[in-house]
Amino acid sequence: MLKSLQYKDITIGQGACSLLGMQIIIYLYVVDGLLIDCGAKKLKREGSRFFLEQQIEQVALSHLHEDHSGMAAWLQKEMGVPVYLHEMALPDAREKGKYPFYRHLMWGNRPRFAPEPIPDVIKTEKYSFDIIDSPGHTKYHKVLHEKNQGWLFSGDLFVTPKPLVALYEEDMQDTIASLQKLLQLDFDTVFCAHKGVVENGKDALQQKLDFLLNLQLKVEELRQQGLTDQDIDRKLYPEIPLITKVSKGQWSSYNIVSTI
Ligand SMILES: [Fe+2]
């Protein structure tokens, strides 16, 4: 069952997917008729029940990863709502998701769907969301900022202040630039797709930025001493986590070191 929680005017759907003892929580947000990210196909039974109980008029996806877009096809077909996505990700969305087997096991198969380019501003009856480019976690990533409320729906840009692994397509320099840009905005609460509601969210984003800048200095210093990125990775992250083994390196600390 997808747990339904309430935070101010926002209904939150909380679900979990797991693989080999690794569990990842997914948070979906419904704000005044706008659904932000729609979860994995593996949550179809409980997700669809949750969606039918909500008043959903439009859907905005932060990015195309299958744990954020797996139910988009269902929402379009069964609820007839528009789904918005980064313009550059539209062609991939029109094909069924292609990703490694462990991700199919974890999240299910993402069916093809037909999103529309996400506009610069999404309005609901009560709120207005600025849609902001925020590459890093993936190249085509958007966050939603409601400046009057001080809300930032951050997709997968935050997740944790001190990342230990990154996905092969992540770029830590882009993440740093996106964090620096977002920290110029007015907000205090972050709504993260895997961490839930983060009050003092601006401090949390600042913490992540500080952590990455610090790491960048350390990596630079070691590079200047002649160490390769592989050497630096082994030195800074001696333990190899389960996710690195399961994903055959798709998720790894090396991806942090080599792109920072
Ligand atoms: Fe993601």
Image (tube, rainbow, N blue to C red):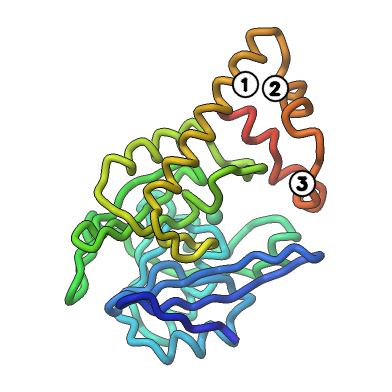
Q: Would you name the residue on which mark 1 appears?
A: 219
Q: Residue at x 48, y 34 (%)?
A: 210
Point out residue 104 in the picture as x, y percentages from the top left corner.
70, 65
- Label ID, residue 229: 2
Depth order, front residue of 210/107: 210
Point out residue 137 in the picture as x, y percentages from the top left corner.
51, 45
Point out residue 120 in the picture as x, y percentages from the top left corner.
23, 54
Quadrant of residue 223 within the rendered picture: top right
Tags 2 and 3 touching, CB below 8 Å = no
Q: Could you give the CA–CA distance between mark 2 and mark 1, rounded to whole angstroms?
A: 8 Å
Q: Is residue 151 above or below residue 175?
A: below
Residue type pointed to by label 2? Asp
Q: Earlier in the sequence, mark 2 or mark 1?
A: 1
Where's ligand 1: which quadrant?
bottom right
Q: Residue at x 40, y 60 (%)?
A: 199
Tags 2 and 1 touching, CB below 8 Å = yes
Q: Is residue 157 above or below residue 221?
A: below
Q: Would you name the residue on which mark 3 appears?
A: 244
Q: Residue furthest top?
A: 225
Q: Earlier in the sequence, mark 1 or mark 3?
A: 1
Quadrant of residue 10 within the rendered picture: bottom left
- Label ID, residue 74: none
Q: Could you give the CA–CA distance between mark 1 and mark 3, rounded to whole angstroms?
A: 20 Å
